[in-house]
Image (tube, rainbow, N blue to C red):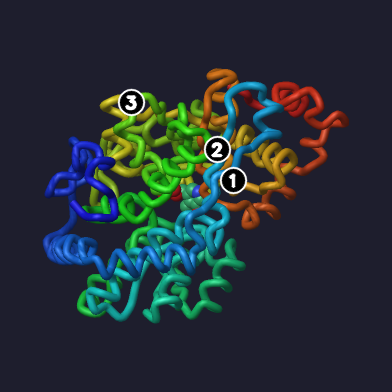
Amino acid sequence: MNNLVAPEINTENLPDKKGYFGEYGGSYVPPELQKLMDEITESYERISNDPSFIKELKELNEHFTGRPSPIYHAKRLTEAVGGADIYLKREDLNHTGSHKINHAIGEVLVAKRMGKKKVIAETGAGQHGVALATAAALLGLECDIYMGEVDVKKESPNVSRMKILGAKVIPVTEGTKTLKDAVDAAFKAYLAHPEDTIYCIGTVVGPHPFPKMVRDFQAVIGIEAKEQMAKLTGRLPDAIVACVGGGSNAMGIFSAFLEDESVRIYGVEPAGKGLDTGKHAASISRGIKGILHGFKCYLIADKNGEALPVYSIASGLDYPGVGPQHCYLHDIGRVRYETATDREAVEAFYALSRMEGIIPALESSHAVAYGVKLAKQMGKGKDILINLSGRGDKDIDFVMEHYPLSEYEPEDYMKDGYDEFLKHIGGEKN
Ligand SMILES: *Cc1c(COP(=O)(O)O)cnc(C)c1O
């Protein structure tokens, strides 16, 4: 147990020593890699209990990232929906624009204290790569980012950002030239130079200790939110909602509330073009148990347990697996996993922009879309806290091209409330 996550809020003190959350998680890697994972586990336990580490991390969170991120009462959205009060935890206001900076700084700080000179990671759309390159620049470590050649071409602003920040972007030309091949290439590079480098995962997945370590660094979201809600409303929220890709922003806000039985907790998975179209990435809602990237979880896979291609409008949510703690929390019934489609996410994207002046990331828009439905269901007098994991600047060109404003701009824009807005623009409403 470490001091980042106070024992009383880490439900059942999980994971166990071998990295299991119930039957999920663990470490399924070759022996040579297991040796390195054991080294990281041992170092992390030691470092994360060191008061000088905790102090340094807190200071960087405050002075570099800009924590605590505020909680904002979305009054106009609340009014339009006509149900529970909607509050937003503003992770979009962090430096670099999302929650990812929280674990990037934590991981690079651990790497530095382990005496490593370089951090290695893969990236898909480039968000994890940018966060890690930022943390590496801040703390003076080298940074190598492996990225599929296809993604390098598609995500040129993020590639430029990483290069400007001093990272080396290495295009991966094997296989489908996308995220999965980038993971393999990054692990290969790590195994070749384990003495002076370390691998940094971008969410609560992978072999032990990564799901625990990344969760611990994200737990600051929930710890702050609990205090802030108490100040704002004098009580706990009635429900918490977060989107789930790998599950790091969700574990971050959930972990502080797991023991509070009155708080209903919802994870929102991407239903893509619809759960029955096969074009989605809803690992818990539609997956089977399997092993991916060195850990056990619910997985979108074929009969042989091979991960299948997945899809979401939000590139940060399109991962075939999901963090092991989420699988456990699903099975014990503590957290409910729901879904939102691409279309619903875009509706929420425009709604929040127009009604609150906040352009949310498409990932976060999934949480907003479900949160709005829930607010209607729960009704007046209840409080819902939505984790706004990131800002939408990265998504504006894509949305304008594929979901043009004209379709979302009926004459009496939302004059009759959110329900009427949904009717105007049609699409799937589940
Ligand atoms: C990467 C990303 C996510 C998804 O990752 P999780 O580990 O599930 O949190 C969600 N929101 C934003 C803004 C992201 O950049």
Give, as a three-letter code, the residue at label 2.
His
Q: Is residue 26 above or below residue 74?
A: below
| Left or right placement of residue 46 versus residue 281 in this view | left
Q: Residue at x 39, y 77 (%)?
A: 139
Q: Secondary structure at mark 2?
A: helix
| Left or right placement of residue 422 versus residue 172 in this view | right
In the rendered image, residue 125, in percent from the top left (x then y), is placed at 52, 58
Q: Is residue 211 above or below residue 87?
A: below
The number of numbered badges drawn on the structure is 3
Q: Secondary structure at mark 3?
A: loop
For disc 2, the neighbor class at 10 Å (few under 14, some 14 to 19, many from 20) is many
Establish whether ligand 1 lies closer than 8 Å to the Cβ of label 2: no
- Quickly name the residue at label 1: 362
In the rendered image, residue 160, in percent from the top left (x then y), is placed at 58, 73
Q: Secondary structure at mark 1?
A: helix
Q: Are marks 2 and 1 in contact (CB under 8 Å)?
A: yes
The answer to which of 310 and 369 lies nearer the viewer is: 369
Residue 261: mark:
3
C-alpha span from label 1 to label 3: 30 Å
| Left or right placement of residue 253 versus residue 276 in this view | left
Q: Is residue 303 above or below residue 147?
A: above
Q: Is residue 315 above or below residue 120?
A: above
Residue 315 showing in the rendered view = no
For disc 3, the neighbor class at 10 Å (few under 14, some 14 to 19, many from 20) is few
Q: Are marks 1 and 3 in contact (CB under 8 Å)?
A: no
- Quickly name the residue at label 2: 366
Q: Residue at x 51, y 35 (%)?
A: 385
The answer to which of 406 and 188 lies nearer the viewer is: 406
Give, as a three-letter code, the residue at label 3.
Glu
Q: Earlier in the sequence, mark 3 or mark 2?
A: 3
Instruction: Name the quarter where the C terminus is drawn.
Output: top right
